[in-house]
Structures are given as structure tokens and as C-alpha cells.
Amino acid sequence: MSDLIKKHISEHRSVLDSIESLEESIKEIANLLIYCLRNGGTIFWCGNGGSASDCQHLAGELVGRFVADRKPLKSISLNSDSAVMTCIVNDYGYEHIFSRQVEGLGSEGDILVGISTSGNSQNVLNAFHVANQKGMVSIGLLGKGGGKAVDISMHSVVIQSKSTARVQEMHILIGHILCDLIEAGLNLKK
């Protein structure tokens, strides 16, 4: 057991050290998110499995609060409405679960953040296509080389790890950093 625990901690440290090289990309994305919110836009999130949980978590941090009490920010996880999701899956197929929502809810100037450890989730790729067509900004939090999403999303942060667990750990860390930068950038901290 101890060896397995040490292995996970060692892998985590190694990937964590590698994300320091992503600082400029993280700042660029934070500035896009701040600009969107400052101008009345909405940040939409989508992903599958653990990434879906991260979407709900990060949308909650923005609508609720990350550090200090402040006004709620416009942020929606496209993974949250079971009636909408099951309707779309039943009528159009799982690959359209996010793109249909982006088409109906998104507007020019809004942002779509797609979280995918592989960068190849078809439903996330379809959502990026629709967001791009609508004049939204598309951002990928990706892993494993970025997959197809790195070429479709306008901006991306790619975690250089083949381990889904390590990629997810870095995605939530980067998500928390983005929330902190948003609050600071909008001068919302007390």
C-alpha cells in the first residue's frame, strides 16, 4: 500500500512541477474570462465524467464564491440540468448534449470552457464548433497532448500527462487559480 501511495504522490508532484510553464496561458485565459464577465457575458462549462464534476464545481465557485463574499458571477455548467440533457440525448444523441445547449443559450462574447482529459470527447468538440460559429470564445482545459480539441478551441491549456487522474488534478488546480484571478481582476475581494 505504501508503495502505491508514494507512486501517486510522486506522479502528482512531477506533473505539478510541469504546469509552471503554463503560467502565461493561464493568465491569458484569466484575462479573457474577466473581460467576458466585466462585459455582462456568461461562462459556460462542459465535460464528461470527472470533468463534468469539475465543471459543476467551478461554475459553483463563480456563482457562489471562491474566497470572499461578493456578487454572483454569470457561470453555467452544461452538465447540470438532467431534463435538458436527457431530452437532447434522447432526441439528438449524446454527441450533441453540449452543442445544442450552446446553440440555445450562448451569445457572442460569452465563453465556453470545455474540459477533456483526452481532448477527443465528441460532445465537447461539437460544442467548440458551435461556440466558434456563434462568436463565443472557446477554451480547452485538456490533457494527453490535447487531442483534436487543441486545434478546435481558440485557447487551450494542455496538461502533459497520460494519466487521467493527474490531468484531472491539474485541471481543478488551474480552475481554482482562474477563480482567484477572476475575483482579483474584477476587484471583488474584500
Image: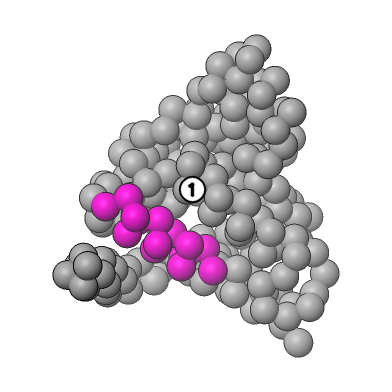
Locate residue 168: give its quadrant: bottom left
Residue at 48 percent across and 42 percent down: it is 49
| Quadrant containing the C terminus in the rendered view | bottom right
Q: Residues within 10 Å of mark 1 (few under 14, many from 20)?
A: many
Residue 17: % across, % down: 27, 74
| Left or right, residue 151 beside residue 140 | left
Q: Can residue 18 be seen in this view?
A: no
Magenta segment, which residues? 163-176
Helix, strand or loop for disc 1: helix
Asked if 146 appears above or below 160 in the picture, the reply is: above
| Residue pointed to by mark 1 | 51
Picture residue at 58% right of the left edge, 74% below the top: 181
Q: Give the image location of residue 150, x and y in percent.
A: 36, 42
Q: Can residue 47 be seen in this view?
A: yes
Image position, residue 18 (x, y; %): 26, 69
Q: Along the horizontal axis of the image, is 97 left or right of 190? A: left
Q: In this view, does 76 lie above or below 88?
A: below
- Residue 53 locus on image (x, y percent): 55, 50
State yes or no: residue 29 in magenta: no
